[in-house]
Image (cartoon, grey):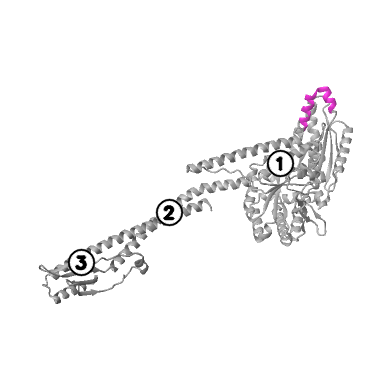
């Protein structure tokens, strides 16, 4: 039984006991008073009647007449005259029941009407004894009315006491509820502080809870900072802070394979010419300044263009991946021109060569890097600051204008030329947790189903992502209703900025409440960084329906998410670039293990994306992930 209920029962029992005790005392006092008054009245009346009878000189008729007249006043139960010889000379009896007092009250509360006795004489001659007993029915009626009045008055007092008790209990319960809510928030991985109450005992409890929450918050922030440091150590070049070779290739591979990755884009490779000679001639200091200058020239691309990433592949090679097709040569030339103006000032012989290649989604990693290396080699053979493009091929559809793209996407939605793919996410026992369901779209009637990488950028530019995401959720609800299998739908970060997005999703989910509990919704990590409050509001509206909310492609910027513990998430999916190669890279394993520990501490499930081989998968289970997906998982399941 809860503490509040015990307090309520104690207060109710106290009020009832006080009420019953007070009523009992009041009734008993009134009964004793009425009984005493009846006895005194009987004695007085008997004395008065005996005096009147003594004046009748012993005439039986006059005495009988006088007693009858006295009895007929209606307030007596009995008047009796007993002669000196012990014989009854006169008796009159009457029985009158209470008019207002109920029978149970009369039987429960007895009022004894003791008769009054007085001697009747004629001078010195004793004539007998008169006995007068008044009716008790009127006393019962009066006692009943008095008891009712007392009970009503005490009931009013009890109600007032109950009201005051309710206010006191609410005052006690409010900080208790806040503390309970604070504890529940901790269970969910949220660090919430509450206002301290004025009650000293509860104030100490709240202070202790707030102190604990603050310490946990600091511990989380410290752990997040440590993870960020581990991430940089595992994935970043120490001198420039750019991605190292393994991490860059992981990002590139994940981008080429993901449904929403780079469909068409460009890759620029930049090589410092004769870095060893610069070291010998000018020293390591000049060589390091040259390397950092190149990194500074590359960094604005990643900062200004979403989906653009860069890395230092080795001592002298840099790489820049562009998410936009047709600009690889232009970007390579711009970099060469900018560095031509800066590098010579650092020392003689400081120069670079630049190679570029246009990317297509159907290209493999080895093909991309081989083609880019060949272009870089040709540029290097041409001399300092030379630029060479390997291929300028790009898909014909890229030449379509924005209006044509918008029209094709709208037609695909209207004519239901969209389908959800299904890729399993499994736990360590290879049991399906849910199905990842990216949306594919048939942009031309009778054509192939295109992945999101082909059409999503244009859908974002045309502001159609809300319609696309709504259709994907509707399809997932239909499929979940049919087979009862949990499904995960990817939402575009651009959709969060539309004020109608959350209400539209909520309406869809409310229309199918049972299937809604099988739906997982996820957005890219960048959405939690750029639109934290919008993601938090989406979680607040949809999680009560039973939907699970999570992040995908996570790991790069987890430390940059403000108050991750307050985002209202259920799970996080680590990006393929984070987990790829973990089986042979201990630094990556340490980072992933720390990330999993941190996220589990926030009551979040952790899944791994893009698992490509058994060795990586086994190491991920050892790191404690809750599930995994990717080519290896799909092939095994």
Magenta span contains residue 280: yes
Instruction: Specify the label residue 467 is tagged with.
Output: none
Q: Residues within 10 Å of mark 3 (few under 14, many from 20)?
A: many
Q: Nearer the viewer, mark 1 or mark 2?
A: 2
Q: Residue at x 67, y 37 (%)?
A: 223
In terms of sequence position, does the residue under pointer 2 or pointer 3 come before the other? 2
Instruction: Specify the label residue 14 is tagged with.
Output: 2
Number of marks present in the image shown: 3
Secondary structure at numbered mark 2: helix
Give, as a single range, the part of the protein colored magenta: 275-294
In depth, the one of 22 and 324 nearer the eye is 22
Which residue was labeled with disc 1? Answer: 595
Q: Is residue 153 visible to the viewer in this orientation of the structure?
A: no
Q: Residues within 10 Å of mark 1 (few under 14, many from 20)?
A: many
In terms of sequence position, does the residue under pointer 1 or pointer 2 come before the other? 2
Q: Nearer the viewer, mark 3 or mark 1?
A: 3
Which residue was labeled with disc 3? Answer: 117
CA distance for labels 1 and 2: 56 Å
**In this rendering, would 469 be left or right of 66?**
right
* Location of residue 525 in the rendering, given as x and y in whole percent from the top left corner: 70, 45
């Amino acid at each position: 039984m809860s503490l509040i209920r015990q307090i309520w029962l104690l207060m109710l029992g106290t009020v009832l006991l006080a009420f019953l005790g007070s009523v009992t005392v009041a009734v008993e006092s009134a009964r004793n008073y009425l009984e005493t008054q009846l006895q005194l009245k009987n004695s007085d009346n008997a004395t008065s009647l005996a005096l009147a009878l003594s004046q009748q000189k012993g005439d039986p008729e006059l005495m009988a007449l006088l007693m009858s007249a006295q009895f007929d006043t209606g307030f007596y139960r009995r008047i009796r005259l007993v002669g000196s010889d012990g014989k009854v000379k006169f008796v009159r009896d009457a029985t009158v029941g209470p008019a207002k007092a109920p029978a149970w009250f009369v039987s429960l509360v007895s009022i004894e009407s003791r008769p009054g006795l007085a001697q009747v004489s004629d001078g010195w001659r004793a004539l007998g004894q008169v006995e007068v007993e008044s009716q008790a029915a009127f006393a019962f009626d009066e006692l009943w009315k008095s008891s009712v009045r007392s009970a009503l008055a005490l009931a009013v007092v009890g109600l007032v006491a109950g009201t005051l008790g309710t206010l006191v209990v609410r005052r006690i319960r409010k900080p208790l509820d806040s503390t309970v809510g604070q504890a529940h928030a901790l269970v969910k991985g949220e660090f919430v502080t509450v206002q301290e109450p004025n009650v000293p005992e509860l104030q100490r409890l709240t202070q202790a809870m707030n102190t604990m929450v603050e310490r946990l918050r600091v511990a989380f922030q410290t752990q997040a900072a440590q993870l960020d440091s581990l991430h940089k150590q595992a994935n970043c070049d120490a001198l420039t802070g750019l991605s190292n070779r393994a991490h860059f290739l992981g990002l590139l591979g994940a981008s080429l394979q993901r449904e929403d990755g780079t469909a068409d884009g460009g890759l620029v490779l930049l090589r410092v010419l004769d870095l060893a000679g610069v070291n010998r001639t000018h020293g390591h200091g000049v060589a390091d300044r040259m390397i950092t200058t190149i990194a500074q020239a590359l960094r604005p691309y990643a900062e200004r263009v979403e989906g653009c990433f860069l890395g230092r592949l080795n001592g002298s090679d840099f790489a820049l991946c562009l998410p936009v097709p047709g600009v690889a040569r232009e970007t390579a030339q711009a970099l060469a021109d900018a560095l031509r103006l800066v590098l010579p000032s650092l020392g003689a012989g400081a120069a670079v060569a630049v190679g570029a290649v246009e990317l297509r989604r159907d290209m493999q990693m080895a093909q991309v890097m081989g083609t880019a290396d060949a272009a870089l080699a040709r540029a290097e053979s041409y001399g300092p600051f030379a630029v060479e493009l390997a291929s300028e091929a790009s898909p014909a559809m890229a030449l379509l204008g924005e209006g044509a793209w918008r029209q094709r996407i709208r037609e695909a939605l209207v004519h239901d030329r969209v389908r959800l793919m299904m890729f399993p996410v499994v736990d360590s026992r290879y049991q399906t947790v849910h199905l990842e369901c990216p949306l594919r779209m048939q942009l031309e009637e009778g054509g192939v189903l295109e992945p999101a990488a082909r059409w999503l950028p244009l859908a974002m530019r045309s502001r159609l992502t809300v319609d696309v995401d709504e259709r994907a959720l509707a399809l997932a609800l239909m499929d979940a209703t049919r087979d009862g299998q949990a499904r995960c739908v990817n939402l575009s970060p651009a959709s969060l900025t539309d004020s109608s997005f959350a209400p539209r999703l909520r309406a869809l989910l409310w229309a199918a409440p049972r299937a809604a509990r099988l739906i997982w919704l996820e957005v890219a990590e960048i959405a939690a960084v750029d639109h934290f409050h919008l993601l938090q509001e989406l979680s607040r509206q949809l999680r009560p329906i039973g939907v699970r909310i999570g992040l995908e492609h996570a790991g790069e910027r987890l430390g940059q998410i403000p108050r991750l513990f307050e985002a209202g998430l259920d799970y996080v999916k680590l990006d393929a670039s984070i987990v790829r190669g973990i089986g042979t890279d201990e630094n990556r394993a340490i980072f992933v293990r720390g990330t999993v520990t941190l996220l589990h501490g926030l009551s979040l499930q952790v899944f791994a994306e893009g698992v490509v081989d058994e060795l990586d998968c086994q190491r991920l289970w050892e790191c404690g992930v809750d599930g995994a997906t990717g080519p290896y998982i799909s092939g095994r399941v």
